[in-house]
Amino acid sequence: MASTQASTDWNIPKRTTSVVLFACWLAILAEGYDVGVLGAVLPALAEYQEWSLTPLQLGGLGAYALVGMLFGALFIGTLSDIIGRRRMLLLSMAIFTITQAGAALAPTPEMFGFFRFLGGLGMGGIIPVAAALTIEYSAPKKRSLNYGIMYSGYSLGIVAAAMVAMALLPTLGWRWVIAVGTLPVLILPVVAWLVPESLEYLVAKGRIPEAKALAAKLNVRDYRPVAPANPGRRIPWREVMGAMFSGKYLRSTVFFWISLFCGMVLVYGLNTWLPQIMRKAGYDLGSSLAFLLVFSLASAIGGLVLGYLADKYGQKTILVLFYLLGAGGILLLMFPNTMFVNLCFVAFAGIGSISTSLVLTGYIADYYPPAQRGTATGWALSFARIGAISGPIIGGWIASTGLSFEFNFVFFAIVGVIAAVAVSLIPKRIAETPAVALDVEREAARD
């Protein structure tokens, strides 16, 4: 259900919102490259004679980073609500960029997987933190659109990985393609300069003077934060459990987690195996990478469109519709078609997997109480990482069993339908007061 608060009531300047979006976009762009680069180099790794990897081992390499992302989303997402969202955003970005150098230089598959696991800690941690910051600094009626804008960096990062692979793989090899993922560490000071601390975090910790000073610096109008009953608590476990597992939110949590789980199976299964699946369908390496390029580029554009539609018509309606459309696009890839037609179906698959899942993540961050945005999103993403880990492994299992490539599309289409059903069962949003809203009545009562 779309928010009913008028955008004119929002007291955060558009410039501040834009700066936060841009900083988070840069961080997510770098993360998208590092996530997508494995799928881009997977065909080259499959032919890398020094390692002689089986299809199942290739799927396992994809799982290393995803296991790291599981723990990163859980712990860094929770820590962002304990020791600061800005701090954890910068730490996450530093982790996943620096470790790409180790992966590029890895002498063995095991060392490659180890560095991908370490990088996964940062990749998993940055998503819930960026989600919480974006939702916090966006007007209620533009949250899905702004989240789509911010998270378009993820898809564009995958696009960049495919383009770099197309340019460098034939001449320099897969190691250089992965090494490019280290370069965003150079923009870390820019992100640190742009992104402010979370006002919600400062208020939740009882640091009211700091919150007021930051609000003044950001030109936030009529900012009158109300101190929490228990400021400065170190670990908000009671609030965490209350926000996710109480009777008030339990059903929502279950269906959010199921739908996001299925979304991650689609995103990471297709992102990892799509080029290889299309090669088995008879396309050469360049054409196979083109499918990954269209898959990611369509999802970047689709994220903006779905975000706009979700703000206008409600997240649930749009998510159900496009998960089903994505499932249809995936299923139709199993039939013989022209290159152009298959690229169109791949575009629908990208929108119905990556675009829908990013809108769903923003929906989660917006659904739960403000002080637990990072924690609730991180926990949901951590559970969903099991799906993300399963996607590449299942693709590797299908390849190792000798089943036809069409079976991949049937499986992933069924997953898309399950995601749509789970979203349809999420209850109506429970209204919460924005953390930086003007609380006139309580202030008057206190005076």
Image (cartoon, helix red, strand yellow):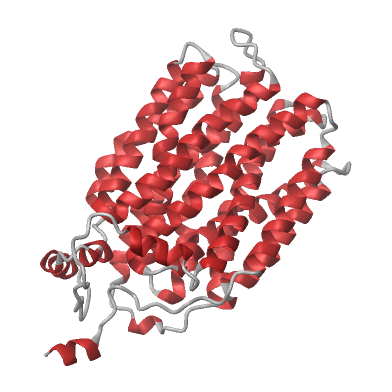
Question: Which residue is found at the position 41% from the left and 84% from the top?
Answer: 6
Number of numbered markers: 0
In this rendering, the answer to whether 74 lies above or below 364 is: above
Name the residue at the right extreme: 336
Q: Position of residue 348 (x, y in %)?
A: 71, 54
In this rendering, the answer to whether 336 lies above or below 350 is: above
> Can see residue 286?
yes
214 or 180: which is nearer to us? 214
Name the residue at the top extreme: 50
Q: Position of residue 401 (x, y in %)?
A: 80, 26
Q: Position of residue 187 (x, y in %)?
A: 31, 40
421 or 233: which is nearer to us? 233
Question: Which residue is found at the position 34% from the left and 62% from the top?
Answer: 238
> Can see residue 194?
no
In the displayed structure image, the side of residue 107 where residue 190 appears, left or right: left
Question: Which residue is found at the position 40% from the left and 21% from the top?
Answer: 102
* Image quadrant containing the N terminus: bottom right
In the displayed structure image, the side of residue 213 where residue 19 appears, left or right: right
* Image quadrant containing the C terminus: bottom left
Question: Which residue is found at the position 50% from the left and 25% from the top?
Answer: 177
Q: Quadrant of residue 29?
A: top left
396 or 287: which is nearer to us? 396
Q: Position of residue 229 (x, y in %)?
A: 21, 73
Q: Quadrant of residue 121?
A: top left
Q: Quadrant of residue 17?
A: bottom left
